[in-house]
Image (spheres, rainbow, N blue to C red):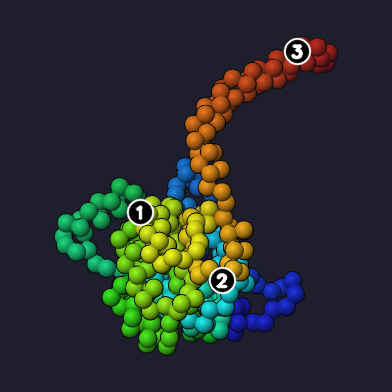
Amino acid sequence: MTSVQKEKNGSDSLTAGEKLLAIYQEDGFEVHTGWNPYHLDNWRDAQFTYLKKDGRPLNTGGGGISWHEIPCLELLSYCFSPERILVIGNSFGWSTLLISLLWPSAEVAAMDIGVQPPADAAQKMLGAILGRLRGDEPPLNPKPTYGIELTNELAQKHHLKAKAVLSASPQDVGWVVEKHLGGPPDFVFIDGYHIPAQVLLDFDACYKVAAHNCVYLFHDVINWNLRDAFEACQKRSGLAGGILWRTPSGMGLLYPDARVELKRVFQAFGDKEAEIQSVKAKLPRWKRAAWFERAVLHSRLLKRVKDSLIRSGRSSPPQR
């Protein structure tokens, strides 16, 4: 019996995040997630999740949501109880399994195209060159559908009602929903190919088959410059919602006006964009001021400390 399957009570109960970590760690994976970008020269993707096994990075075509975004989904799980959930973009199953842990009674289907081979020799050569420039470690080279198969293996092992399906959005959305959900989804998580045109295609395909009260969560809206596409989805659908500024990727949430309970999510993970833009405008001046403080004030303080130590040493009695 795995640690995730064991009954836990009181102070020993595991959060969904802890269960998710245990699922992968028990299968021999190292999970790396939730780093502060400031600690890594402001690397944008430092907060997000990747896996290693035997010291080698796993390549399944993408990463996973940040450790610091899990509480946002946990709050969503308190706000509504979907019966059928569709995930666009699975990679190695991190988000899919988390969603299944948060809504254990829901049917969860995740769509993914797997790792696509280079389209031609030039693309293959470019990939090799970029890998050398980055100094990439030799990756694990599982078969193209490894992430899909891993997700299904872990879901079955831990008795989760989740299934990853080899499929492509938008063209396969209809049959995946019909075959694997058995009805219209009432929650959709969009985390596929991060270009505006694809986001629009993903949303339109999902919106056509979704329930009228469906909730849509979009990953990486701000970090990947997908805001225009997100707002186009909102305008087309007439749904309420907006940007969750307190999430590391700047996720977007859309929902019907009737789901007033979801305002809790914006209370916790939203913020005033005007204040964010105001701080952004002031940052160059703040950085200059900080440089001045380090260069001048700290140097003067250090000199005073040194002078004080020297004077203290001069006034000390000679040592015998």
**Observer-nearest residue: 215 or 313?**
215
Q: Earlier in the sequence, mark 1 or mark 2?
A: 1
| Secondary structure beneath label 3 | helix
Residue contact at pointers 1 and 2, CB within 8 angstroms:
no
Q: Can you give x and y, in whole percent of width and height, for residue 238 in the image?
A: 44, 65
Single out the mark in the foreground, 3 or 2. Answer: 2
| Secondary structure beneath label 1 | loop
The mark found on residue 51 in the picture is: none
Tell me how far mark 1 sits from mark 3, CA to CA: 54 Å
- Mark 1: few, some, or many residues within 10 Å (few <14, many ≥20)? few
Residue contact at pointers 1 and 3, CB within 8 angstroms:
no
Compared across the picture, whether 9 is left or right of 209 comes to right
Q: Amino acid at mark 1?
A: Asp
Q: Amino acid at mark 2?
A: Arg
Q: Earlier in the sequence, mark 3 or mark 2?
A: 2
Q: Report which residue position mark 1 lands on.
A: 136
Residue positioned 46% across, 69% down in the render: 216
Residue positioned 70% across, 14% down in the render: 307
Q: 224 above or below 31?
A: above
The mark found on residue 311 in the picture is: 3
**Observer-nearest residue: 198 or 6?**
198
Residue positioned 53% across, 85% down in the render: 159
Among the 4 quarters of the image, the one containing residue 185:
bottom left
Quadrant of image for the C terminus: top right
The mark found on residue 259 in the picture is: 2
